[in-house]
Image (cartoon, rainbow, N blue to C red):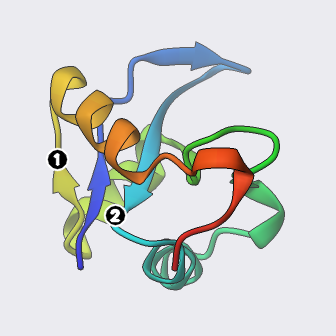
Amino acid sequence: MAVYVDAAIWKWAGHRWCHLLADNTDELHRFAAELGLRRSSYQGPPKTTAPHYDITGFERDRAVRLGAIECSREEIVAIFRRVRVPNGKVRR
């Protein structure tokens, strides 16, 4: 299983943000906990179709040091499509 991050380019609330995704939700939550993210930061069905966390550039740097794979915009879009949850049902 793998965890992925894109570039921190989205500006909001004085920070730059990016996406943290994984091949499955269990791995995503495990990695997020290792980063110290609160579970309440999780974004998934039914709010969004692709399970992910939005993280700051600072958290992204730590994620990469912990083994997250850096992805281009095109790559992260392909991963979003791959992990997307049809009908809001979480894949584990």
| SS assignment at label 1 | strand
- The percent position of residue 85, horizontal first and vertical second, equals 57, 51
Residue for point 28% across, 55% down: 4
Q: Residues within 10 Å of mark 2 (few under 14, many from 20)?
A: many
Task: Name the kind of residue labelled 2 in the image.
Answer: Ala
| SS assignment at label 2 | helix
Viewer-closest of 73 and 82 = 82
Write down the quadrant of residue 66 in the picture: bottom left
Q: Is residue 10 above or below residue 75?
A: above
- How far apart in space, not on screen, are marks 1 and 2 (Cα)? 9 Å
Residue for point 27% across, 35% down: 76
Q: Is residue 51 above or below residue 29?
A: above
Viewer-closest of 5 and 35 = 5
Q: Earlier in the sequence, mark 1 or mark 2?
A: 2
Reading the image, the residue beneath label 2 is: 63
Write down the quadrant of residue 13 in the picture: top right
As drawn, the label of residue 70 is: 1
Residue for point 81% across, 46% down: 46
- The percent position of residue 9, horizontal first and vertical second, equals 39, 18
Write down the quadrant of residue 12 in the picture: top right
